[in-house]
Image: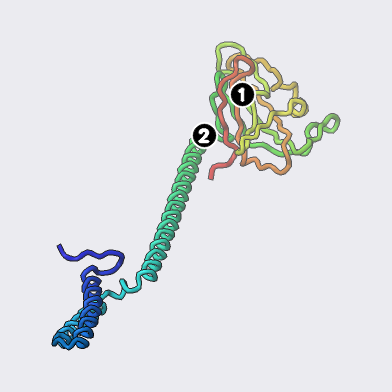
Amino acid sequence: MGWKTLGGYSCMWIALSLIGFFAALIFLVMGVIGAIKKNGTAKKRFLWALASFIAFVVGASNLPRSEKEPLSGQAETVSAKVEDKEAQKAAAAAEKAAEDKAKAEEKAKKEAEAKAAEEAKAPRTGDTVSVGSFSVLVNSPSTEPSIGNQFLSQKAKGVYWVFPVSVRNDDKEARTVDSSMFQLVSNAGVKYDPDPTAAIYANNNSPFFLEKINPGIVIKGFVVFDMPTDQQIADYKMQVRGGIGFKTTKPVDIILKPKE
């Protein structure tokens, strides 16, 4: 079955060196005793002592270098293993971070593409959209610091966004139109309602204040929003509902950003 290693030393060479060492001592002592007694055995015992010493030298000289220095070798091995594990952990962490970053970038890319595709299909200013029982046309707005005429006017707290709007009743009965059907929503989800007082100054006879119109009738006027001066029109969409109160409908979004 061969010799096995134990504690970092070869058992075969250990046994040979130990046996040789102790045998050399024993035969040396016996040779000295034989020389004292002069019984003729001294020479033979000295030869055996020499042979045993040679066996000790052979066994000791054949011990592997790594086994003669077990502590330093083991320390180096342990240190190398620890460093290897730390390197593996660092590599695994870096790989996971790279994978997470790639997934996040891919997700953001898909979301941006989906949003762009949705915006490409969405109606924009200048398009007529069907909302509930109405056909609605919202045109690009102008910006004004105040609204009205030389006799009656109102100054904006920020700046007025004035939208020209047309609404047609497509129902089979009279329906009520009001500026509350319109709302601005920013890309961040912030919502702005129209300024009804400014709408009175912008419109003659207040066509967008609880105006009841019969089927097929079209009314035109302005919907006015008082907006912060640092806002950009392209960052907003107009939400239009098909009625007011209990007759309102799910809103339709009109993109205010021009097509690229």
Instruction: Say which of marks 2 and 1 sits in front.
Output: 2
Q: Residue at x 55, y 20 (%)?
A: 132
The residue tagged with tag 1: helix, strand or loop? strand
Q: Which quadrant is the N terminus positioned in?
A: bottom left
The numbered mark at residue 122 is 2
The answer to which of 47 and 54 lies nearer the viewer is: 47
Left or right of 102 in this view: 12: left
How far is the residue under mark 2 from the one under mark 1? 19 Å
The numbered mark at residue 167 is 1
Left or right of 121 in this view: 67: left
**In the image, is residue 210 above or below residue 232?**
above
The three-letter code of the residue at mark 2 reads Ala
Which residue appears farthest toward the right when viewing the image? 151
Left or right of 203 in this view: 139: left
The numbered mark at residue 90 is none
Upstream in the sequence, badge 2 or badge 1?
Answer: 2
Left or right of 150 in this view: 74: left
